[in-house]
Amino acid sequence: MTTVLVSDDRRIVREELTRVMSAVDGILRVEGISHELLLMRYARQPVDLVLVGAQRSAPTGVDIARRLVTAYPDANVIVFGTPMDAGRIAQAIAAGARGYLRWDVARPELVATLAHAVSATAALPMPDRTSRGPELQLTERELQVLRGMSQGKSNGQIGRELYLSEDTVKTHARRLFRKMHVTDRAEAVAHGFRRGLVS
C-alpha cells in the first residue's frame, strides 16, 4: 500500500487532488500540505510518492522539488501542472523529479494516471541525458521550438524570436509532438529533458 503527499500552495488544489487520490486503489494514506511545510513533513515521515504543483505563477514548487530531491535523492517526486506550465515542469524534471502529471485532464484519466504512478513508483523514469538516439530525428527548427517551450514561451513569443508566424510555430510543434509520441508541451519538454535535447 502506498503513502502519498500532495504539495501545493493552493488549498483548493490540494484538497481536490487529495480527494481524487484517496479513491485510487493501492493508496493507503494521502495528505495535502503546503510547499512551506513539505520538507519538514517529509523529514519526519517519508512517503512513497510526492506530488508537487509547479504552476507558472509560483516558482516555489520547482524550488521545493529541487530541495527535496537534493536532500533525499531516493524521494519519488512527480510534478503536476497544465501544458502551459511546461517551463516550470521542465525545470523540476531537470532538478530530479521523476515525471509529471497533467492537472487538467479528465477525472477518469487522472485517476488512471495516478493508479499507474502508484503501481510503478519504483520504476518511474529518471531524467536521462543521453543522445537523442537514431529513432528521434528533430530538425533544427523543431529543436528551437522545443527549447522555446522549455523556457515557458508562448507560440507567439517563439515565432517572434525565430521570425516565424505563430501558425508556422504550431506546425513545427505538431510535427515535434508526433515524432516524440507526446500530446502536449509539458510532455514534450519533459521528454526533451530526459533525452538531453534541452537544458
Image (cartoon, helix red, strand yellow):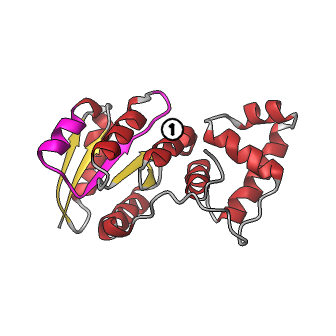
Q: Nearer the viewer, residue 114 or 86?
A: 86
- Where residue 132 sits, quadrant-wise, is bottom right
Establish if 2 lies above or below 39: below
Q: Is 23 displayed left or right of 101 in the figure?
A: left
Establish if 71 lies above or below 77: above
Q: Residues within 10 Å of mark 1 (few under 14, many from 20)?
A: many
User: As shown in the figure, which amino acid type bears the numbered disc 1?
Assistant: Arg
Report the number of discs. Answer: 1
Q: Is 102 displayed left or right of 155 in the figure?
A: left
Q: Which residue is drawn at 72% across and 66% down?
A: 136
Quadrant for the N terminus in the image = bottom left
- Kind of element beneath mark 1: helix
At which x and y percent is residue 123? 37, 69
Q: Is 152 displayed left or right of 114 in the figure?
A: right
Q: Residue at x 74, y 55 (%)?
A: 174
Q: Nearer the viewer, residue 187 or 124?
A: 124
Residue at numbered disc 1: 88
Q: Is residue 64 magenta?
A: no
Q: Nearer the viewer, residue 189 or 111?
A: 189
At which x and y percent is residue 51? 33, 48
At which x and y percent is residue 199? 60, 44
Q: Does the magenta stretch include residue 47?
A: yes
At which x and y percent is residue 53? 38, 40
Q: Which range is magenta?
A: 37-57
Q: Residue at x 55, y 52 (%)?
A: 190
Furthest toward the left, the residue is: 44
- Where residue 129 sits, quadrant-wise, is bottom right
